[in-house]
Image (tube, grey):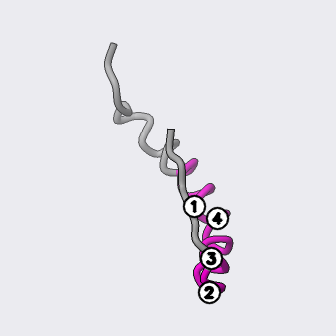
Amino acid sequence: MQRGIAEDEVGEWLKWVVHHYDALVLFFEAAARDGDAMMVWLD
């Protein structure tokens, strides 16, 4: 079993990551501006 991302999948993964990142930026900025703590759980 090989782990990781195949070269031909990189573009699709980048689209997925950027989509989620862009959606969360405003939320993260608001939390930082208001002095709220954040915890990010990556699984």
Relative to 24, say whether 8 is above or below.
above
Q: Verify whether residue 25 appears in magenta.
A: yes
Contact flag, marks 4 and 1 (Cβ < 8 Å): yes
Q: Which residue is denoted by mark 3 in the rendering?
A: 36
Residue indicated by mark 2: 33
Query: Residue tagged by mark 1?
Result: 21
Question: Nearest the camera: 12 or 36?
Answer: 36
Disc assigned to residue 34: none
Whole-Å distance between the Cαs marked 4 and 3? 15 Å
**Which residue is at 64% across, 64% downward?**
24
**Residue situated furthest bottom in the rendering:** 33
In the image, taking residue 5 as reference, residue 32 lies left or right, namely right
Which region of the structure is painted magenta?
15-35
**Quarter occupied by residue 1:** top left
Q: Name the residue beneath numbered marker 4.
A: 24
Question: In 3D space, how far apart are the residues under numbered discs 3 and 1 (Cα atoms)?
Answer: 19 Å
